Image (tube, rainbow, N blue to C red):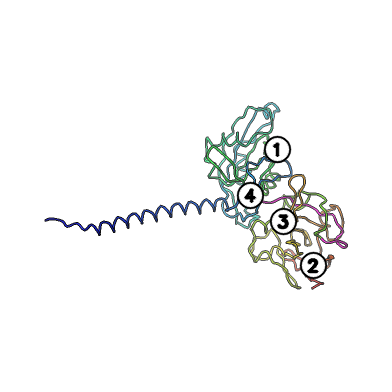
Amino acid sequence: MIRQVYPDRWFAWTIAVIFIIFLVTWGAVERYSIELDAANDGVATAILTSTESQISSESESTRNIKPTFGIQRTLVVLVNSSYLVSHNLRLISKERARDAVFNRTNAFISENSYGKTSMKGRVVGPYFIDTNDPEIDNSKIFELAAKDVDLLKYDRVIVFSSVSSRSTVGKQKFTTPDGEAYFSIMYNDYTDDVGYPLSHEFGHSLGMMHTGFLRCDMRNTRANDCQISSEAAGPFDPMGVGTGHYTAAYKDLIGWFSPQQAIIAKNNGIYRLEPLETNSNGPKTIKVPLGDNLYYYLEYRQPYDGVLLYVSPKHISGWGGGSEVHLFNPRGQTELELITTHTLKVGETFTDSNGIKISVVKANSVRASVSVRFLKQ
């Protein structure tokens, strides 16, 4: 039997196959592009400085705090050096570094984010660098770590070495042996005394700056006219000198609050505040608008018996990169006193020269009730 061939039909099938191949290829490229943008949050974040020192930037971009959710793929790198050996300084062990990062710090971050953010990854090293200089270039560390891991697969890099504690503020692009990577990098001292320093520097890597303290008499001046007294002196959270939860303002700025947890007080009324530390969907902060994109952030912490007032985002640059969240004392005291004097207690009222009146109506272990009134409305 002779099989008849239809040229027009074969031509149509050829065009159809080519079109299908084009669609599959285009979809793969588009999917890769979307995944890459998601991994990079779509925006490069400028490198700033921490309290302790500065990390040199390899690229300039605009800082932008983006929501940080889900598992943060974290690489811990241990780097020994001639400097540590010559000074009889012992580098933290793999086991203790793993516990410090993936147990203690991970638990702290998970609790602070109400389960929205966590850390997962591995520890590599220890590597050895023959240098008597305590400062080590990023490129040398990347070169060593790239022998064991693909640096492009990580969101956070934590280095234990002779380098003094520091961190990028948010993620940044770095050139590595594996290609251009996008992650935050933080350095910690070589020892295992890493409780407060690690939570402080990791806060920077998530996008937080310092918690400062404002010097002003709140009865005679507006909060947004006050001057900074101490840049990293907030006594309650790790971005100052405390060990409790990060401030409500920073939790809000990096996206850990749901709309129900960050209430904007636009009208006169009594607003409820739950303790900042509790994992519930109730209100964790009251934001009182001040104009110029400034807010009073009100938060309620346990076991303190009153409400704390912060001003944010008020960026003040200076040593260590500056602060964006500032605690102030509603009694008008100009310097840090006992931390209990910073709370606005039940029955007390604070009125600023903007005509904003804030009173604490009641407070217990479950909640606080705060009255907010706008006298100049």
Give the number of the mark in front: 2 or 3: 3
Could you say which is closer to the camera, residue 220 or residue 247? 220
- Point out residue 204 in the picture as x, y percentages from the top left corner: 68, 48
**Within the magenta stretch, is there residue 218?**
yes
- Point out residue 250 in the picture as x, y percentages from the top left corner: 69, 56
Q: Amino acid at mark 1?
A: Ser
First in sequence: mark 1 or mark 4?
4
Q: Amino acid at mark 4?
A: Thr
First in sequence: mark 1 or mark 2?
1
Residue 247 circle label: 3
Q: Which residues are magenta?
A: 206-222
Judging by the rendered image, the residue that carries numbered circle 2 is: 360
Could you say which is closer to the camera, residue 192 or residue 314? 314
Tell me the element at label 2.
strand
Give the number of the mark in front: 4 or 2: 4
First in sequence: mark 3 or mark 4?
4
Real-space CA distance between mark 2 and mark 3, rounded to the nearest whole angstrom? 19 Å
Residue density around tag 2, few if under 14, some if 14–19, many if 20 or more, within 10 Å: many
Check the picture and name the quadrant holding the N terminus: bottom left
Q: Residue at x 69, y 51 (%)?
A: 208
Q: Is residue 227 visible?
A: yes
Real-space CA distance between mark 1 and mark 4, rounded to the nearest whole angstrom? 22 Å
Give the number of the mark in front: 3 or 4: 4
Residues at badges 1 and 3 in contact (C-beta under 8 Å)?
no
Judging by the rendered image, the residue that carries numbered circle 1 is: 164
Residue 100 circle label: none
Tell me the element at label 1.
loop
Q: Amino acid at mark 2?
A: Val
Left or right, 21 with respect to 122, comes to: left
Q: Amino acid at mark 3?
A: Thr
Judging by the rendered image, the residue that carries numbered circle 4 is: 45
